[in-house]
Image (cartoon, coloured by chain):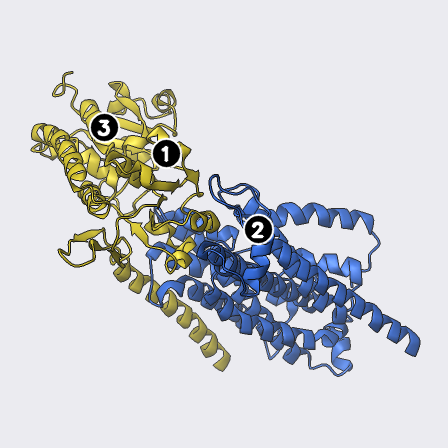
Chain colours: A yellow, B blue
Amino acid sequence: MRRNIKKIGVWIAIVVLIGAAFGSGYVLAHYLKSPEVKEIGETEEIVSFIDGVGRTIKITKTPERIVSMASSSTEILYEIGCGDKIVGVDKYSDYPSDAENKTKVGSCYSPSLEIIIGLNPDLVITWWYGRNSIESLEDETTVMYINPESVDDVMNMIKLYGLIMNKTSEADSLVDEMQDKIDNITNLVGGLNKTERPLVYYELLKRGRSTGQGTFTNELIFMAGGISIAADEPLRYPDLTDEYIIAKNPDVIVVVSYGAAVDEIKNRDGWENISAVKNNRVYSIDTHIVTSSPRLVDGLETFAKWFHPGLFVE
Amino acid sequence: MEKTYYRKRIRWLTIIIGLSIALLFTVLFALMTGVMGPIGNGIPGIDKISFRAVFEILLGKGNWPDTYKTIILKIRLPRIILAGLVGSALAVAGCAMQGLFRNPMASPYILGASSGAAFGASLVIVLGLSIFGIYTMQLSAFIFAVQAVFVVYNIARCKGRTPVETLLLAGIAVGCFFSALVSFMKYISGEELRSIVFWLMGGFWSATWDKVYAIFPLIILGVGVLLFFSKALNIMLTGESTAMHLGIEVENMKRIVLIFSTLITAAAVSVSGIIGFVGLIIPHVMRIIVGPDHRILLPSSCITGAIFLILADTLTRSIIEPTELPVGIVTALLGAPFFLYLLRRKKKVKWW
């Protein structure tokens, strides 16, 4: 009997521990915020801001040697005319093509710290989820983590880079240019109500895997006048069953360029009656334009043309 | 009798000294190797570090750029020491577990420590926890690793005894349970998925002095205690009842060996992720080379484990620049063929 009580105690301890971890996790997970920009005028600091993991970053001198481990940041820096300040990039930074000539430092998950230090950078930019592998450099140089989750975040990030790099006018004009293109689209489709929006099934690498609540892709789909069939799914990347997809009967299917072939999707068993397949509205999209980079407006325009072919006549 | 005893002692001493010298050279070689040189490809447009620079920086002499000092003292050195500590810990723990269970399949992970740690780490990665600062993940991995073995031990205990078969089976079951939880964490994760995958493959790219300081005392203590029990482990090989008749407090000893094996395994796993193979194979390799006596097997496994993991990690740093290969891949790719070769060559080896 006493032994049983002991065993029950052990199990309760496990359950409580796991429960506590989950509970505190959900509270703290929302702590991760997007960059906030605060300009501090005449002091010696050029700019200070909260980065994507909640650290306060102070930039006191315009960076001259940047290592960018986020391809979208690489793109932004090139766009605002700071490509020459980049000394190292991650292996995914391939746009614009000049980025390919920069020293490669690996991926943000397993970078070579030695190459990074060897490049002697004064600013290292990386994704928030790459922190585990690089936090030991936080004492050596300025490391900022980014966590853009929405189009607004991207705009703010561009402005932030403008401040950091002392290129505010370039950044502002880039943002304005993007905003114009976005406005052109939202003026036409922004007012649509739910029934007027085509249902979109966005497929990632694997059959059924789509984008759920709070993802950047779903925001773009919505801005382009569509609505994702998984828009309310709590998981960020849910695996949808065939049954779910067929029941939702999407009007448009978009698959990422490195995923399944369009023809394969059209020929899937049981999918022949899905509206998108019947009406031949299955498309493949270049994933490079559905990211947190300035090219997101291209993605937006592509989506809008597919979702509302009547409204956007070329 | 007396004479053979001395001869054995001298042989053992030679082995230990030889291995220690090998370890020293391994460390020096590893310190020299890296993209920034002296042994390495170098980065275009940037001077490589010279051999002289490495020695002078190590001795605290000379006027070298801060970049060099950072690379040698803050990136390479802690990483090498960490790899050495983890290699020793896993090899010794594996050796002790194999002796205790009298089972060649036993490894430090057999009682669920790795699955527990994997769950602890993935939990923190997915939920983005930072309750205990930047080392929350390591702490969580450690706690869950110990927790898993604690549960296994308590489940297997029956009327004051812990039969090894029950321990092994309970270990496998609890391991499966935690593996399923890890799969679940992977399933609900988003961008963090690859962080989990990388952690599961194990590696030292995030080595810091803090991590060295955290696990150093634990591993030295644990390895020391297990070395102390090498004679008892020898007697255990004759079977539990025989050992009992020879005056070994079997249950007590089992508990102590398990506690310290688990502690050093958990410490190792928490800073490096799950590095397979070292804990399983190094003891076998050493058994082939030095024989099954734990008094020499344990210390020689300890040093060889360190050498092996430092070498493997040095390879991961230089094999596919600039990205680093997870060291777990290298240990298995290098170790398995070598082990199979030894196995073929010495088929009639006396395992136990």
Q: Please tell me which residue is depicted at 67% across the width and 62% down the height of the picture.
A: B24
Picture quarter with the C terminus of chain A: top left
Badge 3: chain ID: A
Specify the amino acid type for callout 1: Ala
3D distance between C-alphas at marks 2 and 3: 49 Å
- Please indicate whether residue B315 sits to the left or right of residue B234 in the image: left
Decide: is A132 above or below A13.
above
Going by the numbered disc 2, the residue's amino acid type is: Ser
| Residue for badge 2 | B50
Residue A99 - label: 1
- Please state the horizontal and vertical placement of residue A213, each as a whole percent of the image: 24, 44
Looking at marks 1 and 3 on the same chain, the residue that comes earlier in the sequence is marked by: 1
* Dot 2: element: loop
Q: Residue furthest bottom?
A: B247
Distance between the alpha carbons at the discs numbered 1 and 3 = 20 Å
Same subunit, labels 2 and 1: the answer reads no
Eye-nearest disc, 2 or 3: 2
Q: Which residue is mark 3?
A: A298
